[in-house]
Image: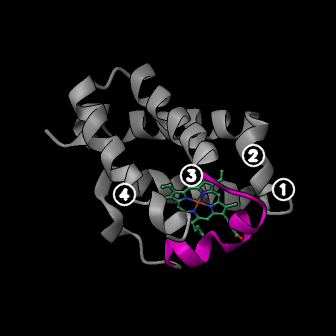
Amino acid sequence: MSLYDALGGAQAISGALDAFYVKVFADPRVSKYFEGVDMVKLKAHIGAFFAMALGGPSNYHGRDLRTAHERPRSMGLDDATTDVFLGHFREVLEEFGVDQARITEVMDIAEGGRDEVLAR
Ligand code: HEM
């Protein structure tokens, strides 16, 4: 079963995406990196991140992650903040009842972007 199915299809994915957006937006530790960046971009970010975590990095054809995060890095984006961001993502998966094995699998994909985001 794909993660898409595991999450319950299109409607559940859209709900999970909204839930993740609300968490990121409400948490100043991560939302501050989007200050001066419009909310449309935050939504695009959440959407792009989610798609990558579900389908793998090859689905994304925009700016590479290293370049896309130049500004957040200049604002101090680090491992601890990335942990917080990914923690919100894990919470959403848990709240939507995804089983632990599947969560581990998806978190590994999400983690795969960390080094590029942090430019190392
Ligand atoms: C592994 C984790 C991450 C992935 C896969 C990811 C993915 C992306 C992608 C694909 C973009 C480009 C979106 C676009 O231009 O349409 C982007 C931009 C951005 N990301 Fe991330 N991101 C990650 C982690 C983070 C974290 C932890 C933060 C901050 C807490 C963050 C903040 C931003 C910001 C502020 C932008 C917009 C930068 C700008 O336009 O100047 N990202 N991210």
Q: Residue furthest left?
A: 1
Mark 2, residue position: 31
| 44 with respect to 38 (left or right) | left
Residue 79 place in picture, x, y as percent: 57, 49
Magenta span: chief secondary structure: helix
Write down which quadrant ligand 1 falls in. bottom right
On residue 46, the disc is 3
N-term-proximal mark, 3 vs 1? 1
On residue 35, the disc is 1
Q: Secondary structure at mark 1?
A: loop
Q: Quadrant of the N terminus?
A: top left
Residue kind at label 3, given as amino acid type: Ile
Residue 90 place in picture, x, y as percent: 44, 32
Look at discs 4 and 1 and give the one toward the viewer: 4
On residue 79, the disc is none
Mark 4, residue position: 112
| Residue that appears at 23% across and 37% down | 5
N-term-proximal mark, 3 vs 2? 2
Dividing the picture into quadrants, the one containing residue 36 is bottom right
Crowding around mark 4 (Cα neighbors within 10 Å: few <14, some 14 to 19, many 20+) is some
Count all numbered tags in the image, as a single digit.
4
